[in-house]
Amino acid sequence: MYQNRETRASKHRGIAILAAMIFIVIFTAFSVGILSMASANLQLSGNHQKSNMALNAALSGLEYAKWIAANTPTDSPTHINTVTDKQADKVWTNLCAQVKSAREDGDGKTKTHEGDDGQRQWVATDWVKYLDGSSFRICFVRYNDNPNTAVRENLTIYIYVEGKCEGKCEEFKRTVAMQLRITKDAQVLNYAIAGRGRMWLAGNTTIHGDIYSSWNKANISPFNMTDDSVVEGSLNTVLPWQSMLNKTYQMQTFLYDTNGRLMLSDGKTLQRSSGYLYDSSGRVITNSSGTPLNILSLKFKVENGLNVATDTSGNPIIGYVNGQSVGPVVYGNPVEAFDADGNRIYSSSDELKGTYKTVNYSQPDQTNMPGLSINDYYDASGNSLTALHYKSQIPASNAVVSGSTIENGKLSTSGVPTVTEYFPHAPLASGGYSVAASSSSLKLTRYKYEGKTLRNVVISGGTNALFKNCTFEGILYVDCSTSGPTSTTSTYNNIRFENCIFNGTIVTNVPKNLNSGWWQRNCLYFTGEATFNNTSGYQEATILAPHFNVNLGNTNPTQSENNVLTGAIVGGIVDVRGNAQIYGTIISMADTTAYTSGYVTNIGATENDGGSETTEAGDIGVIEITPNEEQMLPSGITTPIVLKPLKNTYEEKILPEEIENLFERGFQ
């Protein structure tokens, strides 16, 4: 019995040893696998890091390329809406020179080469060091126009930037690309509405973009929005929020702490009444003598989204807390009030009650935005640019009359019946156009044209025409005095269009001055059912009427594809009511700050601003405005030529072989 037990134990010990060896082999293999995976992951992590370094280098190179383009001299400002081949060639030549003159930090000039193979032109840099182990190179390419198409390829410049990171064993490369356009400066078209006066948005109005006002009188709000209006972008004002804090109105509802202080985005707080600034611990910020600083009485400059208090010379002011210096006095912006669900909180005193993305304060003024200054509409010799570009295309003789068609010349008033109207007039229920709204209304003797088709016609100053059920094609040019309207009838033109169809563009002469009563005398007034469908060769503008009161009044009773205004609508003040779809920018370029409360650009229902003509129920409708920043400004506005990055063309891609060859040609 004892021997059998020993034999069985010996057998069991053999099995245990075998099992242990098997487990050791398995665990060893598993450990080797883990180590191999760790090594692979480490390698992958290293590769990923190098790839990201290459991409960052390429992105840095793209910014460098955009900087080169932004600093490239272009041709003189022009007042035609296209860039000529000669101008485009000059820009390209200047860009090549700018690339060659660009320098690296500490390494002298960047090596470059350029070429032209008859199909395309290019200028490229050699590798430029970016960070340790990474670098980038840039190639600008411009193709010649294809003679078989109408597309002008020579106005587009392609940027290719290759970034690389060199490792111990291999090299990683990434490529990004973007396009530049040689074009006229049309920054104003980035906005759905841009103007030098105040703006009211009311009724069922939707703005698919940003709006901008250079109104600079802090005693009255630059914007007013009713709760049924929507701006899907930002509201931009040149006024600083600091200047509006203690006025009788408020733009928005801001957050306040338990001490009644305005909460700022950087954690500081502000006492509105005194202008005292408190740090995040609630301690007042003083000058070196211990006197609290009133930052609302100080100048400031905006840096990186924060406000830096400055003296009159623009130097930063040093602040102190409990006698200890805290450096330059820097503070954030007011914090908007939102409820627990993320909804913006409104108060009854808010000027902005509608829906909008944000308000941007302290924006640049209009001086660098072509299209908002009356000087942009004149050449260096003082000539009206609209007359040079549009009136000159129409014969100076009387228009030819053939049946109901009037075309190619000056509109005759001989034998044309007249009617007496007033502007502003009484409500339609109280007599309408033939009754004055007040003793200050302007009395007009209108020449009446009904049921006509007008094509390429000039309306002489003082005609003050009434067009009923007319159709307009080509150019309708409304003349007036370039000095501005006076009491002499021939110096102005107040035109009313009733139930008319516009298949062309309306252009006016350029009154340089806003003389007394200008908004009454120089006016384009659209009533009834106005249908806009511009099919002419002037797609850049539906209405080009600088320093005119453009009052679109009531348009079609329902929104439709036949009620579309395409391109810029330029006026001194532009009001839009009723139902309309606008694909372009409304530009109200008259500086109205000389008036106590200014005149207002009304979008939506009429507000009683003193310059509105009616308050009819039909004025309230659905209005949509969609800007198109890729559109050209119309001829007749002086703007510089620029190299504009096309944001929607950015892409990451494999470097095309032809571009690789262009890179290598000059560096072999």
Image (cartoon, rainbow, N blue to C red):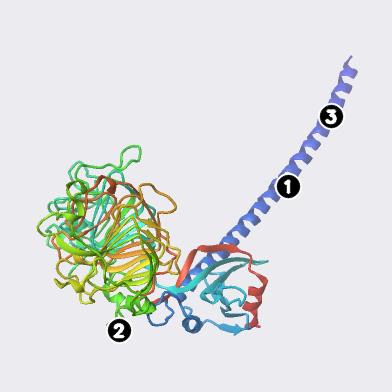
Amino acid type, mark 3? Ile
Q: CA distance from mark 1 to mark 2?
A: 82 Å
Q: CA distance from mark 3 to mark 1?
A: 26 Å
Q: Position of residue 251 (x, y in %)?
A: 23, 51
Query: Can see residue 288?
Result: yes
Q: Residues within 10 Å of mark 1 (few under 14, many from 20)?
A: few
In this rendering, would 438 be left or right of 446? left
Residue at image point 35% right, 47% down: 557
Residue 210, x across and y down, in percent: 35, 57
Residue at 76% across / 44% down in the picture? 29
Q: Position of residue 215 (x, y in %)?
A: 22, 62
Res 347 → quadrant: top left
Residue sitting farthest toward the left: 439
**Which quarter of the rendering shows the C terminus?**
bottom right
Please determine whether, in this image, residue 152 is positioned above or below residue 199.
below
Measured Cα–Cα span from mark 2 to mark 3: 106 Å
Instruction: Return the mark for residue 32.
Output: 1
Q: Which mark is residue 375?
A: none
Identify the mark nearer the N-term, 1 or 2: 1
The disc, 3 or 1, on the residue closer to the chain's N-terminal end is: 3
Asked whether 10 or 322 is in front, the reply is: 322
Q: Amino acid at mark 1?
A: Val
Number of residues whose C-alpha sits closer than 10 Å to that of mark 2, classed few (under 14), some (14–19) or many (20 or more): few
The residue wearing badge 3 is 15
